[in-house]
Image (tube, grey):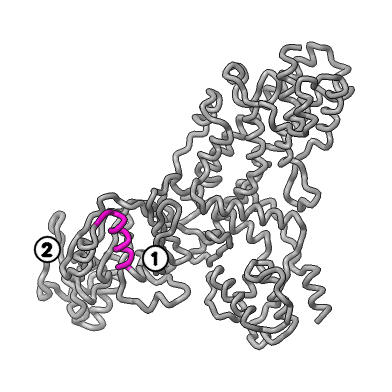
Amino acid sequence: MANLHNKLACLTLVSGLAVFSSLQASSNTPSGLHTHSFEGFTATAISKALSMGRLSNVSDTVKNGDLLKVNTSASPYSLHKHGPWLTDGGISGNSQELIKALKDARAHGLNPDSYELPTILATVKRILELDYGENTTDHLSLSELKSLKLSLRNNLNTQLNQAFLKLAQDLGRGAVVATDVQRQMFRKAPAVNPQEWLEALTRGEISAKAALQSLMPHDASYHRLTAHMRKLLDEHASGKRRVSVALTEDNANKFSKNDNERLTLRLMETGELLLNTELTGNYDQTLQFAIERFQQRNGIPVTGLADSRTRQALNLSVEKEIEAVALSLERWRWMPRILGQKHIMVNIPDYTVQVRKEGKTLLSMRTVVGKARHATPTFSEEMEYIVFNPTWTVPKSITNREMIPKELRNPGYLKSRNFDIMRRDGDHLVKVPYDEVTAEDYSAERFPYVLQQRSGPGNALGRMKFMMPNEYNIYLHDTQAKDLFSKNERAYSHGCIRLSDPETLARVLLQEDGFSEAEIETALTRTDRKLVRFKTPVPTHLTYMTTWVDEQGMLNMRPDIYKHDEALVTALEGKNTLIKTLKQVPLISSTDRQVSKDS
């Protein structure tokens, strides 16, 4: 038999796939999540090979139990002859890496079965059986056996090709088309050509593992989500049920010993309290602060009281948390792979804007975003300049729906608010005297002029606006309505992003762009209109993430203010991703019952 040593070495690794260890079923795997195993075949194969003396050249490796030291990288000759997945002796290291990635697809909110992992493993098992199985090929002639092996290898090659292409596509740009499932989504999906990556694999220019890692999002936020997803999947697999709390709006219930013990136990599970926290049954400062931390993580008004909304969030099932994390993983896959060494990130459901540099957050502040009927869109553009003491050219929709009706109800309103009436003359706006505007103009279905508010203390855009030119006329700006920033939910604008502290944002961006302190002070203190252009434009990403994991490893969740989640859930279920495999489990746990009994 040609090249017996290489063949046995390769097949020994495959049969040991500790490698496929990640593919072996957990005894606690929950229903609805499929697992895959060689069902003890590997031990038999190794035992038989050892007894026949076939592994003499690699016996030390086998006896030490360190099968991963066997070299499974395909040689250039092997790549040319067999492609990236097979070798003369069996299955290559690329196959090993791809199969591990397929199993790990759940951590990305995907489903291994969508990539035909059971079929792939069955083919691998059959190949191993033909080489080392007992009494499985006695009825076949040598030519028939050779033909069967060749057929299986061809099948496996095709199966792995197809699995790689689909996984590369799903990790590289998302399992669903973003613009099909989310309104006001104007970000182009990352450009991905899986076939080119497969060809690079075949040429030996990159490994399967490196290719898939290059395709998926690189940002730490994505990898924190996958790490948390693994924890949730482990919890789901354990079958352990979460402590539940009573659903009540009665704040007096905080004096119930049973209720406070339930709250304490559940907050131990969520991480707000240490696992050795004493069950006093009292609503004390420790419990209050834990509730406040939980409320803050979940976008709930921070009161320290276990109100109805807080209790509903506490009772969220592990399946629903898995679903929520899966949605954000998919939305991250829609994002550009290169966000920018320094960039701005606006998270609409969180009502925040961050300036990030080299993985660190330089600045975070509250924002006001578009109300539901004027939803802030999601897109990525480069911020190019700041306008200090800007004028406000009123969009036509606001002019006709809001400003002109106010003028009709209260004649003189526009003039008192420093609005000029303008007409377009080519690319320019020319001021029109108020006395030239007729009653017919005001009562027309569409006002024939343009309204422009002069810069100054009463200007709706405040003292500055931050411009990333785009066709949607969306930008970040100061505001006169400072009181809105004290609210928990802040969807009040017509689509633009209002800033709670625009001066600090301007300082940080200008400092990072190399402006001197004197130049910054001059820009901030002048009273006339001034455009300051960045030397290096700042990539700016408007995102919609209802779930994320913070730098402390804690899961944060926010209300779906624009109701985008439902359509995405439906689409992901239609693509047979992870969330379709989930089954709800009862909320009441044995711990709950014990607390109730003891009380």
Q: Which mark is drawn over residue 430?
A: 2
Name which quarter of the figure residue 556 lies in.
bottom right
Q: Is residue 443 visible?
A: yes
User: x, y (%) of residue 192?
Assistant: 47, 37
Q: Nearer the viewer, residue 235 or 193?
A: 235
Q: Nearer the viewer, residue 13 or 461?
A: 13
Name the N-terminal-most of marks 2 and 1.
Answer: 1
User: x, y (%) of residue 547?
Assistant: 55, 60
Which residue is under mark 1?
374
Q: Nearer the viewer, residue 116 or 343?
A: 343
Q: Which residues are magenta?
A: 502-515
User: x, y (%) of residue 128?
Assistant: 78, 26
Name which quarter of the figure residue 346 lies in.
bottom left
**Secondary element at image label 1:** helix
The answer to whether residue 442 is left or right of residue 109 is left
Q: Is residue 380 magenta?
A: no
User: x, y (%) of residue 598?
Assistant: 83, 79
Q: Nearer the viewer, residue 98 or 581?
A: 98
Give amino acid for label 1. Answer: His
Q: Is residue 506 magenta?
A: yes
The answer to whether residue 47 is left or right of residue 161 is right
At 36% from the left edge and 65% from the top edge, which residue is drawn?
A: 497
Magenta segment, prevailing SS (helix, strand or loop): helix
Q: Pointer 2 and pointer 1: residues touching (CB < 8 Å)?
A: no
